[in-house]
Image (cartoon, helix red, strand yellow):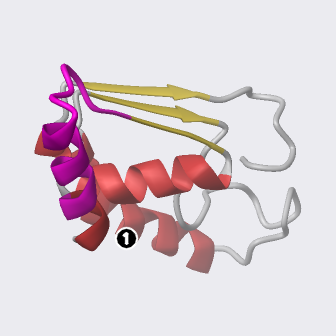
Amino acid sequence: QDVCKLVRSAARAVDAAQVWAMGYSMGGFGVYQIVSCQPEIFDVAVVVAGYGLGTLEPAHLGYYAPQPEAGQVFADFLDRHAARLARGPVLLAVHARRDATSS
């Protein structure tokens, strides 16, 4: 909430025409967090190779996340954030299928 308040204040102070949130990898995770907090502040959110919490990836791949536990964490993340993220005008998520680091 404090970061969103700061973003809103800075946008007003410079009379911003638009407010974008952009992040790569862990920064993309941050974009998902901040934009889902107050989606009405942001005109565009761009996430490149970002991630949420949890994964549907099989336990024998990537980070060897235990399943079904990691899948439930992912489902909970979506339950908390997806509907709010969808309220923003633009959410662009770019991710390579072959990314072995951040699935």
Q: How many C-alpha atoms fall within 10 Å of the one at disc 1: few (<14), some, or many (≥20)?
A: some
Residue 21 place in picture, x, y as percent:
40, 38
Name the kind of residue labelled 1 in the image: Asp
Name the secondary structure under disc 1.
helix
Q: Is residue 91 above or below residue 80?
A: above
Residue 63 place in picture, x, y as percent:
84, 66
**Along the line of sight, which residue is nearer the eye, 101 or 55?**
101
Q: Is residue 71 magenta?
A: no
**Residue positioned 82% across, 36% down in the render:** 99
- Give the side of residue 50 with respect to residue 90, left or right: right
Specify the quadrant that holds the N terminus.
bottom left
Q: Give the quadrant of residue 59.
A: bottom right
**Along the line of sight, which residue is nearer the eye, 61 or 46?**
46
- Give the side of residue 42 with respect to residue 64, left or right: left
Q: Is residue 66 above or below residue 4?
A: below
Instruction: Answer yes or no: is residue 68 visible.
Output: no
Q: Is residue 45 above or below residue 85?
A: above
Instruction: Answer yes or no: is residue 5 visible.
Output: yes
- Residue on which the image places disc 1: 76
Q: Which residues are magenta?
A: 5-20
**Residue positioned 84% across, 49% down in the render:** 101
Residue 11 place in picture, x, y as percent:
21, 39
Q: Is residue 86 above or below residue 36?
A: above
**Residue positioned 70% across, 55% down in the render:** 57
Q: Is residue 13 magenta?
A: yes
